Amino acid sequence: MSVLDTLKERGFVQQLTHEEEIAELLAKEKITFYIGFDPTADSLHVGHFLGMMVMAHMQRAGHRPVCLIGGGTAMVGDPSGKSDMRKMMTQETIRNNGERFKVQMQRFIDFSDDKALMLNNADWLLKLNYVEVLRDVGVHFSVNRMLTAECFKQRLERGLSFLEFNYMLMQGYDFLELNRRLGCIMQMGGDDQWSNILAGADLIRRKESKPAYGLTFTLLTTSDGRKMGKTEKGALWLDAEKTSPYDFYQYWRNVDDADVEKCLALLTFLPMDEVRRLGAFKDKDINIAKKTLAFEVTKLVHGEAEAEKAQQAAEALFGGKGALDNAPTAAISPETVGTKLIDVLALTGIITTKSEGRRLIQQGGLSIGDIKVTDLDFLLTADLFDNNSVLIRKGKKGYHRIVIA
């Protein structure tokens, strides 16, 4: 089975520029390909993880990935899938974010002995001469054709800045530059990047008279079309400091039944026979598949030891077995004991605002140990602690341990 067959079977592939040529190419040759990652935050999120799984499958089949950090393109901002212009960032912020990306990517991709490369498009984009780019690159882009691209069409009514309009040229130029430097002949990306990928492949064909290819993979969405990876705290980050391994584990443990098989196929390396076996479970048995999904994805992102800790914490909290040592824990000083519970929860970050805490209490969604909290002025007193520890339940599945340090 070729890597393209693998990607198709697991549900990655959405669109290809030249399907028969790509199938033959990936089966018979070892190619250099790239995926771009704009460092618009200080951590990768679960949407990026999908792209890294594609890279990993390709690398395992002998192809060479180029992880392109968008230090230059991030200064403009990709309008694809965005209803408003991205917030402008300083070069220093972009550079620092890119460094964080590098560290995280090394968990998934083998960069030893040039098996993969990591580059930053700031190295060439920030040195370009504007007039030369217009003459050398801009001449090959039709404005009429660009305006038909989905990434621009959905923004025209609300307003599209000339700054963002240049993004397609910049991404196209990246592909051309990587083709010239490394012989990179394929760009991959999420399906919202289709127009930009086409532009780059077309630019190479026009400028270099060489073939170039594009492939897009599915976006990570639920069975009813909603974007996956959103939590009440925001994005599902791959950085343990922004999303703890336990919270990360719990996200996958609680996905909808209808999404389990899809997530197992896309986000783990389990053989497809096992994916289909687990995906066929119904009713209570589907929880076996969810636990497998949560463990496997957490293991890939945070390592096996952290996955085991998260699993043990979940079993202790929900299954009544195992130690609570690995549950999400917040420490308070002895002086804090005896103050209002809402104040303590806000102080420790268990709730984002006191308004959230009041709402939880009024709706019956806050418990401390076995006691449901009904009083807005409920005090966190010393008698509630057992061995300097107390368990808070927020909503149906949000458990947190408070300890006196």
Image: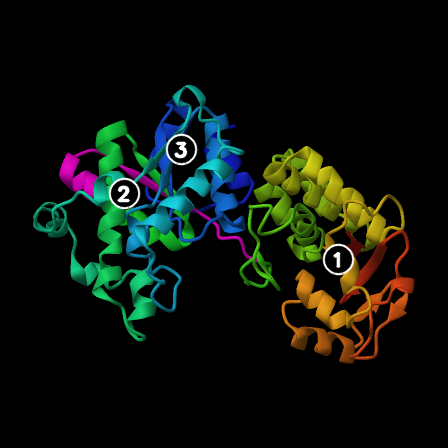
Neighbour tally class for label 3: few under 14, some 14-19, many 20 plus, Cα within 10 Å: some
C-alpha distance separating marks 3 and 2: 32 Å
Q: Does 396 appear in magenta?
A: no
> Which residues make up the magenta segment?
202-221
Q: Which of pointers 2 and 1 lies earlier in the amino acid sequence? A: 2
Q: What amino acid is labelled 3 in the image?
A: Ala
- The answer to whether the residues at label 3 and label 1 have Cβ atoms under 8 Å apart is no
What amino acid is found at the position of numbered circle 2 in the picture? Ala
Residue denoted by label 3:
23
Q: How far is the residue under mark 2 from the one under mark 1?
A: 47 Å
Q: Nearer the viewer, mark 2 or mark 1?
A: 1
Viewer-nearest of labels 3 and 1?
A: 1
Q: Secondary structure at mark 2?
A: helix
- Describe the element under mark 1 as helix, strand or loop: loop
**Residue 347, relative to residue 211: is it above or below?**
below
Q: Quadrant of residue 187?
A: top left
Disc 3 or 1, which lies upstream in sequence?
Answer: 3
Which residue bears the numbered disc 2?
122
Residue contact between numbered discs 2 and 1, judged by CB atoms under 8 Å: no
Residue linked to disc 1: 333
Instruction: Check disc 1 and give the amino acid type.
Output: Ser
The disc label shown at residue 365, or none = none
Q: Residue 308 location in percent, x, y?
A: 74, 38
